[in-house]
Image (tube, rainbow, N blue to C red):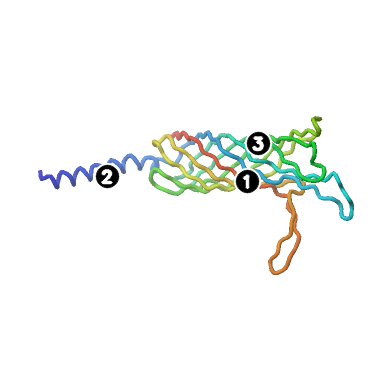
Amino acid sequence: MSSRKFVGRAALLALGFAMLTAVPAAAQRAGAVEISGFGGWYFGSQIYQGTPATGCECTGVVSATVNSAGMYGARLGYDVSRTFGVEFSWSGTNPSLGFSGAGASGLKGSIAINNYDFDAMFNFGQQRVWGYLALGIGWSSFNPQITFSGTPQDVSSQTYFSGNTALGMKAFVSPHLYVRLDARYRWTSTNHQTSSGVGCYYYCYGYSSNYYGAGELTAGLTYVAFK
């Protein structure tokens, strides 16, 4: 056998081996169960805006902002097909609160947040690196702990409807294990005003919002169990 033929066949065998080791991660997706643990960073925003009554001088008006903090959580997913799956997830974080306004002096606090999501997962990719888009709904629980000049304040916990969307990547280490990166935006419908302002498009108008928004960047490991 000539050296050229030997090199050619060796190259074909190497290519075939590479394809065989890459394909299982994509070929055996239907019916797979995925168990994930993750951690990362939570980016909060203004969650409460104190608005004085028209025409009054209210010295106690306070606005509250959720600061950035670490977060962690777990996910359980099921692949209906190679390109579509469903997932339930829980995540938790406990950021500090920032207060502003004339009555903010002496206020300190934090807020424990727990998010519970049901997501539809749209996967794309066929080799060791996959991408995905997630769309979901769920609920978020807020448990604030606030003190005023060192004295604890009576603030009740609240649970609200929420939605989220995410864009992420799965990098397979083996057919049963992959590293996952996730960028997510979450919005929560509250029963109070979270922000207001003036927008201009052909004309200027005032607006207010009852939605609280937060961003999340996380990474973690996922174990994949096949049927």
Q: Which mark is residue 15?
A: 2
Expressed as whole percent of the image width and height from the top left, the position of residue 158 reads 74, 38
Packing grade of label 3 (10 A; few <14, some 14-19, many >=20) is: some
Q: Are marks 3 and 1 in contact (CB under 8 Å)?
A: no
Label 1 secondary element: strand
The residue at 58%/38% (across/down) is: 89
Q: From the image, tell me which residue sits under label 3.
A: 114
- Residue bearing mark 1: 186
In the picture, measured across the screen, residue 29 lies left or right of residue 166, that is left
Q: Position of residue 95 (x, y in %)?
A: 66, 36
| Image height of 101 relative to 54, above or below | above
Q: How many marks?
A: 3
**In the image, what residue type sits under mark 2?**
Leu
User: For the residue labelled by badge 2, is the local secondary structure a helix, a strand or a loop?
Assistant: helix
Q: Are marks 2 and 1 in contact (CB under 8 Å)?
A: no
Residue 15: give x, y in percent of width and height: 27, 44
Classify residue 117 by image quadrant. top right
Near-viewer residue (129 or 39): 39
The residue closer to the viewer here, 216 or 221, is 216
Instruction: Judge from the rendering whether residue 15 lies leftward or rightward of residue 226; answer left or right.
Output: left
Q: Along the polypeptide, which appears first: circle 3 or circle 1?
A: 3
CA–CA distance between discs 2 and 3?
Answer: 47 Å
**Residue visible at 86% across and 52% down in the picture:** 53
Please tell me which of labels 2 and 1 falls first in the chain: 2
